[in-house]
Image: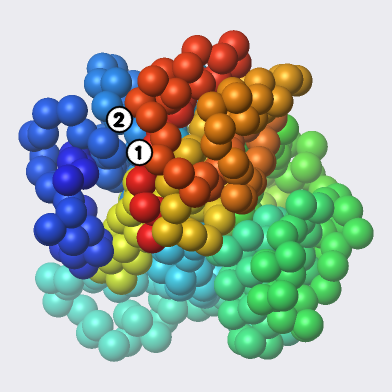
Amino acid sequence: MYKIQTLNKIARCGLDRLSRDTYETATEIINPDAILVRSADMHSMTLPPSVLAIARAGAGVNNIPISSCTQKGIVVFNTPGANANGVKELVIAALFLTSRNLYEGISWANSLAGSEADIPAQIEKGKSQFVGPEIQGKTLGVIGLGAIGVMVANAAANLGMRVLGLDPFISVESAWRLSHEVEKAVTLDALVAESDYISVHVPLNKETKGLFGSERIARMKKGARLLNFSRSGLVDNAAVKAAIAEGKLGGYVIDFPEAELLGVDRILCIPHLGASTPESEDNCAIMAAEQVREYLERGNIRNSVNFPDCEMAPTGKTRITLINNNVPKVISRVTTILGESGLNIDEMLNKNRGEVAYNIIDISDEVPEELVEKLGQVDGVVAVRIIPDCQ
């Protein structure tokens, strides 16, 4: 029986994917085989040697010590795309919020509560200060065409917007889903210069940190709106505040509020609601549970953030999974040991990702325990696991 520890409340529909005959799930559990987590900070946790996998029910993995997990041979999964529709809907809502000044108008209307004056008359007199443009016919620039970016681009095109998309690393799967109406931007600066609205959907890393600073914002159209539903570090807060004060930037919407942005005119701080829908939570939980199950029962890896995707159909035979440093001669030594032990390899799959590699090897015969220990002693091998009668 596999033991699964849950560090946060994981939707029941996700846990139901783990058969009670095969899995034990609990928040307090000794020597778990895998951990399901949402937002709990794992950096200070001491992970027992039993842990084979960690699945984050969500996209971001900043709360997980990825580097140390990789060194220990722990596969870390996330659930890209599971909450994409929830985020997409909020981005579309943000387009209307910032364009039509809805938040400001509603706040002003509520401020009239308790007034003895003629409310309808005051409304008619004051509504002109909240006039804002329609989005139909305007240009939206979408930076990053992953699961969320593609949905945003397609939805905006369906609303009658001209959509420019930019993603030099777009996957084949995303490209297939992208509407033919979305135009390819030649460069980031070209997209910025042409767009009335810009929605950012890229990960935060060394290359993207401060993607929108004072220089890039200066290249935007006067009055353009910027939407950030990815990470706060992508946009320079001081540059945004200065551009808004100067009238260069028409508005900024962020789903990751910081203290310096709160209460600033023309900046809408949404309290990280992108994936806060019951549907998103269910989808993330189901996806996380299924990925853990597939890895524990079959050794297949899908949507890992630290190891390569590697999947091989089960054959009903003994399956060896092996994690190693991506250096020469490791696999040749492994196959030599198998051959010297009289074991024939029926099928084998090897994938690498940077400095690490993952292997699935199917063997017709049983693999003795002493051979597992011998394989684990090969220089460069990080972890070895046997899955008997892999179905």
Residue assigned mark 1: 54
The residue type indicated by label 1 comes to Ile
Indicate the position of residue 224 as horizontal and vertical percent values. 69, 60
Please, is residue 13 above or below residue 308 in the view?
below
- Residue found 78% across the figure and 82% down from its top: 180
Q: Could one spot residue 79 in this view of the protein?
A: no
Indicate the position of residue 384 as horizontal and vertical percent values. 45, 28
* Label 2–label 1 contact, CB within 8 A: yes
277 and 237: which one is in front?
277
Q: Could one spot residue 184 in this view of the protein?
A: yes
91 and 250: which one is in front?
91
Left or right relative to 383: residue 338: right
- Residue found 24% across the figure and 83% down from its top: 119
Please, is residue 385 above or below residue 200 in the view?
above
Numbered disc total: 2
Left or right relative to 176: residue 317: left
Query: Which of the labelled discs sits on residue 175, or is there none?
Result: none
Q: CA distance from mark 2 to mark 1?
A: 8 Å
Indicate the position of residue 255 as horizontal and vertical percent values. 44, 51
Q: Quadrant of the C terminus?
A: bottom left
The residue type indicated by label 2 comes to Val
- Per the image, label 1 sits on a secondary structure element best described as strand
Q: Quadrant of residue 371?
A: top left
Left or right relative to 80: residue 140: right
Please, is residue 191 above or below residue 310 in the view?
below
Q: Nearer the viewer, mark 2 or mark 1?
A: 2
- Per the image, label 2 sits on a secondary structure element best described as loop
Please, is residue 7 above or below residue 141 in the view?
above
Residue assigned mark 2: 51
Left or right relative to 261: residue 155: right
